[in-house]
Amino acid sequence: MITLDRASLRYGPILGLSPTTFELPDGGGITGLLGPNGAGKSSLLQLLSGLLPPSGGEVRVFGEAPFRNPAVLARLGLVPEGDRLPSGLRADRWLRMMGELSGLAGEALQAAVAKALVTVGMSDRAHLTFARMSKGMRQRIRLAQALLHGPELLILDEPFNGLDPEARLILMALLRDLAAQGTRILVSSHILGEIAQLTDRILLLFRGRLLAEGTVTEIRQLLDRHPVELRLTGEAQALARWAVEQPELAALRMEEGSVVVSVRSPRDILPRLQKAAAEGGIPLSALDPLDLNLDAVFQYLTKDHA
Amino acid sequence: MNAAPSPLATIRATALGYAPRILQGRGWVLAGLVAVPVGLSILIYTLARLQGADANPGEALKVFHEVLVKMMLPIMALVAAPAGIREDLEQRTLPLLLVRPAPAWALPLGKGLPWFAWGALWLVLGALGLQILGGDPALLPGRLVALVSAWWGELALMTLIGLVFKRGTLWGALYFFLWEPMVRIFPPFLQRLTFTHHIESLAGSRALEVKANQLLAQEQVSTHPALAILALILFGAICWALAGWKLHRTPIGLAGSEAEG
């Protein structure tokens, strides 16, 4: 569905995206595009959605270059960042226009507008002008315009920005539903927790470079060389003595009633730790991984490349 | 997969979709630019007549040339053009249009047409209003055609300038208020590069009591009216086409306000 072959993007002298290569297969599912502000997420999305041509390399979506290519644009939907919409227009009429610009007409257009409004839960408020809508409502309309023509690929740039918690949950549920129906969704965010809740696949960008791709677990496995923090609760002195003998140990700090160890390759050390505790070799009462979540992965990777 | 809309369908959809914008603040400013000076002239004329003053057909001609053509028409273009495709560029809503399979080159005309129609309506009303001042009925068709075709050309020019230059309104204002008045001193071939030349060719200025050189910007207008109208319409069409070409060719990203890539 999506192929980037050393695709790069420059804004004059500034490199927005370093030569990047990856593929996204056909079929539904959600892919998270993760990275801090300025990582190159929007640059990548602009290449994929055909807004900008690559400065170098090649971008192919549905097998073709997407820039100003109607054959590609007819099959994708974009929800850009922010909640900007044309001032002074009514949502339903604007959606109608957007549907017509996607090649819909007549009854198919009416049905598409109605369906999109139902999907985003805005049927009863579509007669409002954008100025009279809340930010969450405008975000839903922006999503509706991207869904009108039933795109196979839906691209969302920071869609959760500025949404209240309830609206975020609603949007997440909506995206999961669409993915389950076969839509391939590419969603960018710097809000790690939200991406972790949403995606089955992650692309991690930092400073214009694709650092890693895969599931959270796969990415984590790539990171075995990076230390993982574990809190060992029990008799701290004895636990520390055991820990310093382990070859995977990278760092250790004492806390009251516990030891926090940084270890490489946790999959190697954890069985030994469990065995030692079970045999009574160490006085361990609890083991807490401190940073096996997505935030930790992100921190590790970005710190490593900073 | 839906077929991409045709250029005509794109222009129609965009024009109808954005048509409500003309009935908002900027649209009424546009209307006021014609209605206020013409209305004031009619009021002053009526008061003068009530006090016994004689009708003067030259008044209509003066309001037409000195107010509508020289001042209001350019200001209308400067006011309306930024509400066209330039508005989407600045409000960063253009990407929503550009990711559609519709031909991007048709968008500037589609967005400009409602403003053209609205402005043309008020210009026609303004020209008809001038008849109350005693305008020569024989000159009315020429005035109507001159105003509407010049509005077409000036709006198209400003739309193009707005896409080419970041400070399009400034460049447009410089053109209208520095270049156009130079028509008085230009040699004939340069006179033809002004709207004023073609407007005067179409509208004339020969009222019963006004001599040509009292109102005409130029000593002599030699361009045939048919050529003048053709020039204005063609110039407008070329500007719309160039604006469309510029939009189609320019990579415009999510940041919107500037061309990127």
Image (tube, coloured by chain):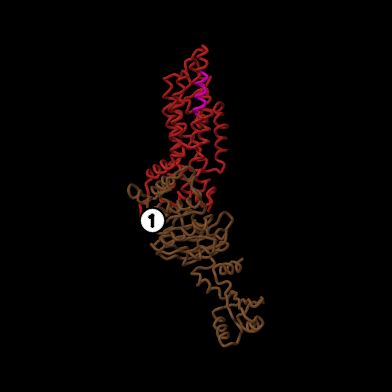
Chain colours: A brown, B red
Q: In the image, residue B126 lies at what x, y percent? A: 46, 26
The outermost residue toward the left is A107
Instruction: Name the residue carrying label 1.
Output: A150
Q: Indicate whether B151 appears above or below A207.
A: above
Residue segment shown in magenta: B34-45
Q: Indicate whether A76 appears above or below A211.
A: above
Q: Indicate whether A124 appears above or below A194.
A: above
Residue at 52% across, 41% down: B162
Q: In the image, residue A158 lies at what x, y percent? A: 51, 57
Q: Main secondary structure of the magenta part?
A: helix
Please report, as a chain letter, where disc 1 is located: A
Residue placed most toward the observer, B25 or B242:
B25
Left/right placement of residue A300 relative to residue B114 reads right
Residue placed most toward the observer, A87 or A279:
A279
The outermost residue toward the top is B52
Q: In the image, residue A85 lies at what x, y percent? A: 49, 47
How many C-alpha atoms fall within 10 Å of the one at disc 1: few (<14), some, or many (≥20)?
Answer: some
Residue at 59% across, 55% down: A13
Which image quarter is the N terminus of chain B in? bottom left
- Quarter of the view holding residue A71: bottom left
Q: Is residue A25 magenta?
A: no
Numbered circles on residues, count: 1
For label 1, the SS is loop
Residue placed most toward the observer, B75 or A238:
A238
- Quarter of the view holding residue A225: bottom right
Amino acid type at mark 1: Gly
Q: In the image, residue B107 lies at what x, y percent? A: 44, 44
